[in-house]
Amino acid sequence: MSNEIIMKVSGVTRAFGGLVAVSDVSFSLKRGSILGLIGPNGSGKTTMMNLISGALKPDSGTINLDGTVISGRVANEVARLGVARTFQLVRLIDEMTVLENVVVGLAFGPDPVWGAEAERRGRHFLGLVGLERLANLEASKLTYIDQKRLELARALALRPKVLLLDEWLAGLNATELKEGISIISSIRDLGTTIIMVEHVMSAIHSLCDQCVVMNAGRKIAEGTPATVLTDPVVVEAYLGEPVHA
Amino acid sequence: MTKQSAFPYVAVIVATALLALLPYVIGSFGLSFAIATLNFAVVATAWGMFCGPTRYISLASVVFFGAGSYTVAVLGDYVSWPLLLLIAAFVGAAIALIVGLATLRLEGIYFVIFTFGLSEMIRQLATWYEFNITESVGRYVFLDITQEQIYWQLLVLLALLLIGGTVLARSRLGFALRVIGGDEMVARHFGLNPTIAKLCLFMLSSMVIAVAGAIMAPRWTYIDPAIAFNPTLSFQVVIMALLGGMHRIYGPLLGALLMSALFEALGSQFPHAFALLLGLVFIVIVYLLPNGIVGRVEQALARVRNGRADASALVEQRS
């Protein structure tokens, strides 16, 4: 991790009708770090991810990626500028093979490749997540964890400047979780900058360099996992007000 | 994905060369049937080229087909034949561009309904124009083009379409279309602009259908809006493509061959129950062949292959 800022979110607001899902949120992300975006359900985390990835446009505020303003651009442009994502509910192309699904990340990105070169690189990215054996299987035949791995490989194949993981660890059992955490830390070691929305606290503790905590659309705390998770404001947001006897 | 065997190209060229000799051996009745079949094959394959990967069901085939026929009917006396075909292609692409810009953001059933409405609107519009402006409903097409020439032109168009379609399916653009058909949201987040890709393909497919309409125009001698824009064609094409299977380039072709044989049989045996039987065939396809004949065959092959793979895996485990 360096001290260089790769992404800067400044005063971003987005409302759906009367509901302000994200309200005046700012934070910055250091190159090569993992930032955990946490908060109770409905606090605006996924909306924040959608704003970064270009699925949604902010009503106000800007998002700057490595010197380029990406807020307000459509998703396919943001993808080419260097943001890749996984989806909260797995989205693979079911009738394509595992390898073809990874090629989706290679064929249309900032540095597109096709043909034999795409297959070679595709296998490389499958190797990173431990799926190279299953390259020719139809994606719909994969187990849940393998589908998640494939989504990750596809996102990595885009060679993003920032990778967004939207509850990538959700729904895994204890063994799978351990494996999942080690995969994420291995891709961090390759120099990938990551923003992860996550509810699994053990993963946040072991992976994140920095956390942003949201509640009801606002940023309520920011800092290392150890500090924010013991912050009374954060504990209150998750568990409600302490009872005074 | 990167299977680059030359077999499909060789097969298409050889088959085309052989079929080109057909008019010399079949009589005029046979030729007429062959022309109808080829026409269906071209339109169904062009339809499948767009609708297969994107999964949009278009009921507007006849709009482009009719536009092609009308190009010939209106300009036939003034312009040379190759130029006519070129103009028809251009007209088809232009209509597709306008329609596509308006509709390709629609999804599922809305697109189906819109395309059907469009074909009805164009038919009414053409009727109104002919009746009020030119003050005659029909037009005569007297061109010096023989039935054999129509056959050969359709054959060449089909060959070009199949070769072009295979090149497309193997290309990055073809892959992009599969991604878009599979999950548009994924496509967007991985650098694709679904609207532009769909629009290009829609124009390409419509262009081919318009050229087919232009080639077929001299066959009728007389055309009016009810003939040129007859919506039955749009439905027949959908049924053919569904019967064959629209996820492969040769699926609609197979469907077109089978269905035109069936249409021929039904039309001559039960001329009054034609629409009824067509409906029954459609029901059978939807219930029994959701992915068409090609889909069924592939499913069966996959089962055989998986059976073998499982067996060899067992052997590996034991050794």
Image (cartoon, helix red, strand yellow):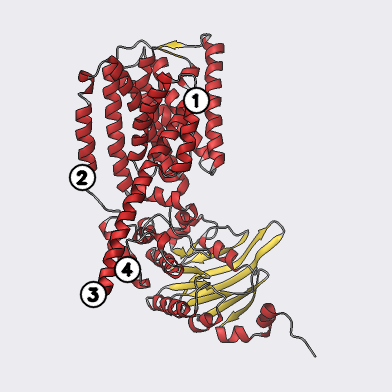
Which residue lies under the disc numbered 2?
B6
- Label 2 marks a residue whose chain is B
- What is the x, y in percent for residue B159? 27, 33
Q: Quadrant of residue B31?
A: top left
- The quadrant in which the C terminus of chain B is found is bottom left
Contact, CB < 8 Å: mark 1 with mark 4?
no
Which residue lies under the disc numbered 4?
A132
Query: What is the C-alpha distance between the residues marked 2 and 4?
Result: 28 Å
Disc 1 crowd, CA 10 A, few/some/many (<14, 14-19, 20+)? some
On the picture, is B177 further left or further right than B59?
A: left
Query: What is the C-alpha distance between the residues marked 3 and 2?
Result: 39 Å
Q: Quadrant of residue B106?
A: top right
- Label 3 marks a residue whose chain is B
Identify the amino acid type marked 4.
Glu
- Label 4 marks a residue whose chain is A
- What is the x, y in percent for residue B231? 49, 26
Which residue lies under the disc numbered 1?
B275
- What is the x, y in percent for residue A245? 80, 90
